[in-house]
């Protein structure tokens, strides 16, 4: 499946596929909703409210900075990350330059896997960097 030219031909090694990632994400959200005792309507209302609040205004800029730092730390070129992640070089370049305004959960997972970096640690570092950027 190719989404608006953001994905190259090859998946990262051991990548379970976009559908499996989206299914796992949906199941995690469902589990959180059930744990909190929320109906679908309540969860949807909270989601809509969170989107309107824009709690992380510099999130994608922070993602780009963290990805670039991790890539450079590994002496990896954008082309190498593209090959390892299955994402196009153009997307990676735009992300790192701060011109990307959205990224899908599958793109973020692909970046983490392409960098051979734990997704949870990547997310933590991005949130930390976003807070630093917002505080400036």
Image: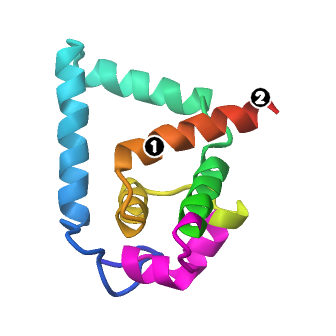
Q: Nearer the viewer, residue 18 or 46?
A: 18
**Residue beneath the point at 60% across and 68% down:** 72
Residue 20 seen in render? yes
For the magenta stretch, what is the residue range?
73-95
Where does the image place residue 11, in percent across and percent down from the top left? Answer: 29, 77
Q: Is residue 99 above or below residue 7?
A: above
**Image quarter of the N terminus:** bottom left
89 left or right, relative to 129: left
**Residue beneath the point at 63% across and 61% down:** 100
Discs 1, 2 touching: Cβ within 8 Å: no
**Image quarter of the C terminus:** top right
Q: Which residue is mark 1?
A: 123
Q: Within the image, what quadrant is residue 64 found in?
A: bottom right
Q: Which mark is residue 40?
A: none
| Magenta stretch prevailing secondary structure | helix
**Residue beneath the point at 35% across and 51% down:** 118
132 left or right, relative to 63: right
Where does the image place residue 2, in percent across and percent down from the top left? Answer: 36, 78
Q: Nearer the viewer, residue 35 or 50?
A: 35
Q: Is residue 113 magenta?
A: no
Q: Which mark is residue 135?
A: 2
Q: Is residue 86 magenta?
A: yes
| Residue occupying the far right of the picture | 136
Identify the element where label 2 is drawn.
helix
Where does the image place residue 114, in percent across and percent down from the top left? Answer: 39, 69
């Amino acid at each position: 499946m190719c989404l608006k030219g953001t994905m190259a031909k090859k998946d990262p090694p051991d990548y379970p596929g976009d559908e499996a990632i989206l299914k796992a994400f949906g199941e995690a959200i469902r589990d959180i909703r059930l744990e909190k005792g929320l109906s679908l309507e309540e969860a949807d209302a909270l989601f809509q409210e969170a989107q309107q609040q824009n709690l992380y205004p510099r999130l994608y800029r922070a993602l780009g900075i963290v990805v670039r730092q991790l890539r450079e730390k590994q002496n990896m070129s954008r082309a190498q990350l593209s090959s390892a992640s299955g994402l196009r070089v153009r997307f990676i370049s735009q992300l790192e330059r701060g011109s990307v305004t959205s990224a899908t959960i599958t793109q973020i997972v692909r970046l983490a896997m392409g960098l051979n970096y734990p997704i949870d640690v990547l997310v933590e570092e991005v949130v930390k960097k976003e807070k630093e950027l917002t505080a400036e």
